[in-house]
Image: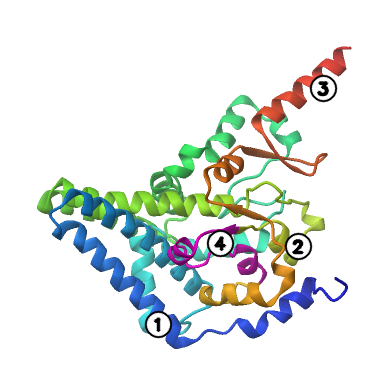
Amino acid sequence: MSNMLCGKELILATKPYAKEDRRKSWLYTLSTLAILIATLAATVLVPWLLAKVVLSVISGLLLVRMFVIYHDHQHHTILHKSVIADGIFTVFGIYMLAPTSIWKRSHDHHHKHNSKLFSASIGSFPIATRQKFLSMSAGERIGYLAIRHPLTIGLGYFTMFMLGMCVSSFLSSPRKHFDALIALLLHIGAAVAIFMFWGWDAWFFMFFVPFLIAFALGSYLFYAQHNFPGVTFCSNADWAYDKAALESSSYMTMNPVMHWFTANIGYHHIHHLNAKIPFYRLPEVMAKFPELQVARTTSLRPSAIIACLRLKAWDQELGRMVSLKELGTKRRRKAKLATA
């Protein structure tokens, strides 16, 4: 155990893996894009309802994979300085209601401030301490809990991407995020055009369901990767980059099929330790370093999902996230002690 790497030593040890294989990057990008286009087209072309449903679900999962690949490109991890790749991913970012100007700004902020208790919650779900939550007004509590509510996450298509990524970003800085308005208008225009010219079933199976699934899964993955039993948060003064990666980012265990559809984003602790490691090399890095194999884990099992979603605030005394029920219990207990 004394030979275990930590801190900057561990980050530096992963540096040799922070190099892409350009051929693999293009292969995975173009093959995913081709399969996605094919499945989307097939939802319209095949005549059988069950096949449409299956293809629509697969399309949604492929959107998740393509989005993670887009996310790697935005980190300048793959296909950096490629004009063709820049063009593909700029169009894809608009298609996914996450234009490059918005996604890169918010996601870079997230990486630099992940697990800090007292920083702006740009690009991440807000975290309140128990003390702060109990001092909130009724309206503030409703707003805070609404952002973290399962329905908000499940309906990420509307809440996190249409409203959060596009509407809010454009209203906050119209000149800087004009592409957010373009993305939203093109999205609505495409939906109307598909509905009018190809019918409701084409709109539903080729457009609505894939986006609904992709944004729901994507929103939950982003939530659960930093809101899970065992997660650690700390004050800004005590924050360290490597600690935030290994103690505040989960390893989400999945079967090989889901690891493929999510482009290995489940190896999130490694991605936060070194965001320059391409998605297809993350399993290789995990296998190489024992230090990364003892990660704090979660999964997509129903019990794990419920356990993550019930977490509401950080209890500094207990050193863990607590549920709404626990917050209420502790408040009542303190009130009883005060009146005793």
Foreground mark, 1 or 3?
1
In the picture, measured across the screen, residue 244 lies left or right of residue 31, that is right
Q: Which of the two residues, 171 or 3, is positioned nearer the viewer here?
A: 3
Disc 4 from disc 3: Cα separation = 39 Å
**Residue underneath mark 4:** 266
For this rendering, which residue is in front, 120 or 98? 98
Callout 4 amino acid: Gly
Q: Which residue is mark 1?
A: 26
Give the percent coordinates (x, y) of residue 111.
63, 63
User: Are the residues flagged by discs 1 and 4 in contact, CB closer than 8 Å?
Assistant: no
The color scheme shown is rainbow
Q: Residue 243: which disc? A: 2
Asked if the residue at tag 2 contacts the one at tag 4, i.e. Cβ–Cβ closer than 8 Å, the answer is no
Determine the CA span between mark 1 and mark 4: 22 Å
Q: Is residue 310 above or below residue 236?
A: above
Part of the protein shown in magenta: 252-273
Name, please, the residue furthest toward the front. 255
Q: Amino acid at mark 3?
A: Lys
Q: Could you tell me residue 10's position as x and y percent? A: 75, 75
Q: Mark 1 or mark 3: which comes first in sequence?
A: 1
Q: Are marks 4 and 3 in contact (CB under 8 Å)?
A: no
Based on the picture, tell me whether residue 210 belongs to the magenta stretch. no
Residue 331 visible in the snapshot: yes
Residue 334's disc is: 3
